[in-house]
Each structure stands twice: as C-alpha cells, then as structure tokens.
Amino acid sequence: MVATEETGSAATTGFTDEERLLQQTARDFARREIAPGAAARDEEERYDRSLFTRMGELGLTAVPFPEAVGGAGFSYRAWTLVMEEIAYADMAMAVSLSVHILSQYPVVTWGTDEQKARWLPDMLAGRALGAFALTEPGAGSDASALRLRADRLGPADAPTAYRLSGTKIWITNAIEAERYLVFATVDLSAGAKGITAFLLDAGTPGFRFGRKERKLGIRADTASELIFEGAEVPAANRLAGEGQGYRIALSALGEGRIAIAAACTGLAQAALDAAARYLTERKAFGGVLADQQGLRFMLAEMAQKVAAARALTRTAAEAKDRGEPIVEASSLAKWTASDAAMSVATDAVQLFGGSGYSRDFPVERFMRDAKGAQIYEGTNQIHRLIVAEHLLKRIAGPG
C-alpha cells in the first residue's frame, strides 16, 4: 500500500500508529537509499549487501516474526506494507528480502528451540542472509519431483548425519547467503513423502556454487545453481522429521506468495505513478498528454489493476493473521498482483512512447522485473489450477 505524493492513492484507514510508522520507515529508507542506485545495480547485475545490512539495522528483516523468537511482532498485513515500499524503489531488493523472510518461516514454525536459538538471531538482525533451495532442473512447479538426494549416515532409524548429492537451480540470494534451507529426498521412489528439509551453512565442504543465472529482470539480486557433492549435514540440522519437507515447503510458499503479491503491487504502483507523472509533463498536439481522453482511460485502468492487486493481497495477509487457510487466497493474490504488475508496467512503457523503450527511463526495468513474478513462486498457470481446485471442492461439498 504505497501512498505517494503523486497519486495519494492509498489510505491507511484501519492501520495502527505503529504500522503507519513502520510503513513510513520503509518508505523513507527505500526512496533515500535503495531507489537512487537501482538502475545502476540492474545494469551491472550487482547485489549491494550494504542495503540488506541497513534493512537489518532498521529492523525490517524481523518484521513479521513473533517477539518470542526475537522478531518485531508485527502482523503479516504490516509486512505487506514493507514489501510494497521496498519494491516501489527496487523489485530486486524486495525479492531478496522476501526470500530471506521465506527461509526463516519454516524454522520459526517447525524448528526445535535449539535450532531457533542457533539459526534465527543473525538472520532476524540482518547479519546473515537466507536462501530457500527448492527448485531443480527437473522440479520447478512440481516440487514433489525433486532429485537432490539425502543419504543417511549412521543407523537407518537414527542417522547421525545426511550426505547431500545433486543440484539446485535458480536459487535467489544464493551467492550472497550464509544460511540455506535445502529440500532433499531420503527416498527417490517415495515422491513427496521422501522430501526432507535441512539447514545448511555456507562453506560446508562439498557444497559450492555453479552457474550464475543471466536474467531478463530482477538482475540486481543474484540467482545461482547450487551443487552438492556429498555435503554432510548433521542430523541436528534436519528440520522436523523425514518426509515432512514437502509440507514445510508448501506452507512456506503460501506465506511467500503473499509477500510477492505485495511486492508486485508496489512495482505496479511505481509504474503507474511514473506514467501519470510523464503524461502531465510531456507536451504534444498543443497540450500535455494528460489532456488526451484515451490516455486518461489507460491510466484509470492501470489504477484499477493496482487497487485490485492491493485488495487481494491485503485479504490474503489478513486471513493469515487470523490463522485461516491461505492456499487459495495467496494464489489469488500472487496471480492477480503479478499479472497486474506486468500489465501496468507494459502500459507504462507504451505511454512513455519511444522513451519507454529506453534504459534512460525506469519503466522498461519495471516491465522486465514484473515478468519474473508471473513465473516464480509458482507460475500463474499453477495458481489458476490451485484456485479452480479449491472452488470445485467447495461446490462438491463434503465427501
């Protein structure tokens, strides 16, 4: 929910004073420190770790977690305010922060007290960056098909460690991270029932980086191949029991999709504001472009899409805060918001005309960044299937 001086589009009705202060803190930081270098970082495909460190110093890396584990104790709805503000300035930094939060949620939910005490403090403070290692060459949307092996070491019924062998791809934050939540299988023939989650530290012997992905957008946030060549992980770093990993991954992704929806809303708002500003400044046909009714209609339709994305994102976040199931709501929010971001950014490029096609203006970056969001965190085709499945279950009723 980004209220800009240009549009004044987002009221904060119903938010607490603390939530408004959190939003303003994120906005001030994003526009003063993140936005000025966003284009250069994109051009150079360079991750600026100092910005992540600053987010930690401001407490933004701990926002949605309970105080009992060292978090800031804000609602998930409040967390979406942060994500919008960061993405308004730079989608790449928003994605990095979202994945960092995503890699912590399973530890908060499923971790032992010892794991939480050992793993979370540095991540909550922004001293350690997290990565969520799920995707593989043959397991993208179908996470149950992953092939990274976790071979038991020691007694079969009480292993002392696991040896990881295989490859992950498209892992956000990979090269910069210190902490990795890795999903592997203890039984290749068991499908989803064999998937198990592990906590892995950077520098573990047998673990290295492979190819760095060359991306269309979100280029300032690194994504890389991870290669496991017999990397040993102690049993104390297994998160929950064997075979619980698929459930853990799906639960975390539901939360992550709401955050990405919020980021897409912020990006879409940035594109809308840029287009509106340009139309009020650019002169043609004897007046400013904003006087053209057809262009006004385009702006109105762009604003409609931003508002719909924001509403569905907030609905999903509030459902999570109430402890309700969020699978359908998070899919609706992510699908709608990412499609809105792509549509609004594309229209912004069109409204800029030839200038929109130039890297001298930010809207071409907005369009490139938006495209990725229609693919990661589950493609939008997958989210259509999820929403349809839940709808049909409700129609069919019990049994």
Image (spheres, rainbow, N blue to C red):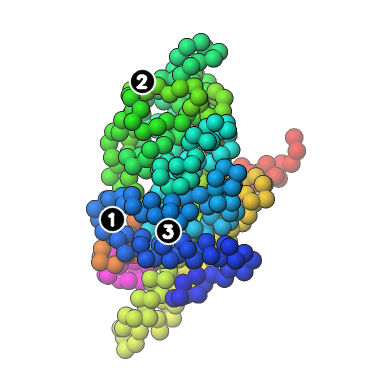
- Read off the magenta span: 342-357
Q: Determine the residue positioned at 58% across, 62% down.
A: 18
Above or below: residue 55 compared with residue 283: above
Real-space CA distance between mark 1 and mark 3, rounded to the nearest whole angstrom:
14 Å
The quadrant the C terminus occupies is top right
Which residue lies under the disc numbered 3? 87
Q: Secondary structure at mark 1?
A: helix
Q: Position of residue 81 (x, y in %)?
A: 52, 60
Q: Position of residue 246 (x, y in %)?
A: 54, 31
Mark 3: amino acid: Ala
Mark 2: amino acid: Gly
Local packing at callout 1 (Cα closer than 10 Å; few below 14, some 14-19, many 20+) is: some
The residue positioned farthest toward the bottom in the image shown: 286
Judging depth in this view, the residue of 168 and 177 nearest the camera is 177
Contact (Cβ within 8 Å) of mark 2 with mark 3? no
Which residue lies under the disc numbered 1? 41
1 or 2: tag closer to the N-terminus: 1
Q: Determine the residue positioned at 46% across, 31% down.
A: 199
Task: State the image quarter where residue 122 is shown.
Answer: top left
Mark 1: amino acid: Arg
Q: Secondary structure at mark 3?
A: helix
Contact (Cβ within 8 Å) of mark 1 with mark 3? no
Q: Which mark is residue 230?
A: 2
Q: Is residue 203 left or right of residue 121?
A: left
Q: Position of residue 29 (x, y in %)?
A: 41, 62
Local packing at callout 3 (Cα closer than 10 Å; few below 14, some 14-19, many 20+) is: many
Q: Position of residue 237 (x, y in %)?
A: 48, 27
Real-space CA distance between mark 1 and mark 2, rounded to the nearest whole angstrom:
35 Å
Q: Secondary structure at mark 2?
A: strand
Q: Is residue 208 left or right of residue 54?
A: left
| Main secondary structure of the magenta stretch | helix
Judging depth in this view, the residue of 261 and 197 nearest the camera is 197
